[in-house]
Amino acid sequence: MLSTIAIESIKRRKTTALLTLLSITISISLLLCVDIVRSQVKTSFTRTVSGVDLIVGAPSGQLNLLLSSVFNIGTPTKGIDYKSVASLKSNKQVSWLIPLSLGDTHRGFRVIGTTNRFFEHFKYGDKQALALTEGRVFEQPLSTVVGADVADSLGYTVGDKIIVSHGLGSVSFNNHDDHPFIISGILEKTGTPVDKAVYVTLQGLEKAHSGPKSAHTSRLRKKTAFLNGHSTNEHEHEHEHEHEHEEPTQDNYDSDAFTPESVSVVMLGLKNRAAALQLQYQINQSKKEPLMAILPGMALAELWQIMGNVEALLLGLSGLIVICALIGLATMLLATMRERYQEIAVLRTIGAGPFTLLLLIQLEAMLLTIVSAALSIALVAVLMSMFKPWLSSTYGLFLSSPLFSQSSVIIVLLILGCTYLVSLFPAIAAYKRGLHAGLNSN
Amino acid sequence: MNIINNKSALTQCKSAIEVSHVNFAYSKESTPILNIEKWQVSRGEHVFLSGPSGSGKSTLLNLLCGTLTPTAGSIALLGQPFSSLSNRQRDKFRARNIGVVFQQFNLIPYLSVAQNISAAAYFSGKGNSSQKVLANTCELLDRLQLPSHVLHAKADALSIGQQQRVAIARALINSPQLLIVDEPTSALDADARDSFMALLKEVSDDNTMIFVSHDNAMERYFDRHCRISELSPPSTTQPPHAVKHTSKPKQESQ
């Protein structure tokens, strides 16, 4: 009966109730969104890379290097000479090395030049290795392995041919269409930036860049050749020579055998992780070529610290918005109390005690908040699924299931607790209201 | 002992209402509005209480309903010391034993007729099943000559006459022993008033009834006519509008 009265009472005041519902729904949605993004970012960050001890690139900044190499966000740092890479490879501490060449795209997805070492050593989440759902790793210089989201959204299967474009925009006018890559494998979904990347061989990427349309590559080559003391013609001749020897050999193709002029970033796995700091110091002090080595864990922690402050601020602001909305709810109930005094007096006369009336007013507030919370959860779920591709492509934020975590439940419970507290004001007003005054107010 | 549930005490006592030395003033400083030495109403008696506006009729009804408590003296209802019960006990007693029909009917506008009536049954705590309450409601509405489709209509969608009957049905749903009716005919013409009174008499034949009106022509419907001026002599009282309210009246609020 109490719930019937509460529901009918809310329906009676539907305009004010709807406006209140709307303001609470928006504020709870905002708070839930902030919380979900916060927890998903944290999960996403921690899942992105594991097992890589050092990331080495040209000196730019710890975060820039991390974002461009692991999250595929932002502009890649300038390349590092392969001599430095070779020197790192020969270091006694280094167990394995993954060279990465960044800066190209395929229909909006980042293209990363690498070797089969990447599929062998790169790990994500809880040291999970990459796996293929279909096909194989690089089988020949123009092989490509695509991430799960790339294959899904573009409908690719093994054997399809793709063209790599120069530059990072989603639309590029500089396509390396002389050298189409053939998809040799499709990676399993990881929930990390790997899903949205196209992996090609360093050799294939170099070949694509050497095409007649790549003015940028030509300029780079000239510069590199000049620095290396070779003439451009000589260098191109070498390449042509190289082409003659590279027949696709399905079983014995060694993607590591190719030696590029430079790469963007190198990921290192060490024999002894404890040596990471020492090697980082050595690399950072390198006099041959200025290099920068970062510890992925520390860089992630730094990034998280920056994000964490913003997140705490956003969470605090959203919390304040929710409190404002709940005060609005209490104000709405208090404002309607004046017109309800007669109704309250009648309820008292027919036997409803003051405590029952207190419960009735609180029930109304609770019902509004519960409906708002349910609407917010539905709204946030819809919004997140709508913006999921955009969040992952623009911010590298991969939303994983379940969307709502324990903290979302805690937030909803806290909001209900706050509703209980703020609704005490109108409820006490109803509780204190005298019978006589209400009945004689006509 | 739970005095409210003491059914034998409620049924054995011959007096429905016993007012002894009741004095009521809205504040300590003001002159009392009511000063009743002794007043008694027997069980099953239908009493007509009259008096001019401001003479203290509604104040006496409020004292009998327990919405006001006497400044001095005692009120016993159905053998229970009603004025000395706690607020909660008084709420329960009222809900179970007193049916009130207000001047403005005071139906809850956003509830349907069925919900208005069943709320009274629910809050009385008598524990009747919803089916039984619905059956009783239908029977009462039938006796009050209300069509069955009215059951699900919202109270504010009813005509004045229909609201009046629903208010009576709500007052009677818990089969109260005492029915208090506060000027429900003031807005009615003579024909409508006669028809209403005939109906009220018919449905409340077994109850003790206090009917308040300033219209002396109504006395013919009742067993006894009490004038408020005789109960509470004017020399010792003062109408409420003449009282300077220096503080809130002592009322049953919690």
Image (cartoon, rainbow, N blue to C red):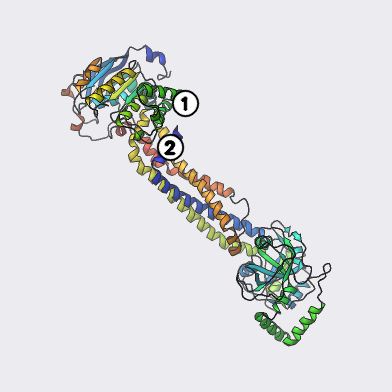
Report which quarter residue A62 is drawn in.
Answer: bottom right
Q: Indicate whether A21 appears above or below A77.
A: above
Residue B122 or residue B10, whichever sits in front: B122
Name the chain letter of the residue that bears numbered label 1. B
Q: Indicate whether A281 appears above or below B132.
A: below
Classify mark 1: helix, strand or loop.
Answer: helix
In the image, which is nearer the foreground, mark 2 or mark 1?
1
Residue at numbered disc 2: A6
Could you tell whether A386 is left or right of B203 in the image? right
Question: How far across and down, in percent of the image, does residue A376 sit?
Answer: 51, 49
Could you tell whether B36 is left or right of A19 in the image? left
Classify mark 2: helix, strand or loop.
Answer: helix
Residue A267 showing in the rendered view: yes
Residue B4 or residue A294, whichever sits in front: B4
Residue at numbered disc 1: B130
Q: Indicate whether A40 appears above or below B208.
A: below
Give the crowd class for mark 1: few <14, some 14-19, many >=20 residues within 10 Å: few
Question: How far across and down, in percent of the image, does residue A78 sit?
Answer: 65, 76
For this orientation, the residue located farthest to the right is A252
Q: Indicate whether B145 appears above or below A131.
A: above
Could you tell whether A347 is left or right of B187 in the image? right
Give the crowd class for mark 2: few <14, some 14-19, many >=20 residues within 10 Å: many
Question: How far across and down, in percent of the image, does residue A222 sit?
Answer: 69, 85
Residue B42 or residue B188, whichever sits in front: B188
Quadrant location of the N terminus of chain A in the rendered image: top left
**Mark 1 residue type:** Ser
- Give the label on residue B101, or none: none
Query: What residue is at 39 percent from the left and 40 percent from the top?
Result: A12
Name the chain letter of the residue that bears numbered label 2. A
Residue B254 showing in the rendered view: no
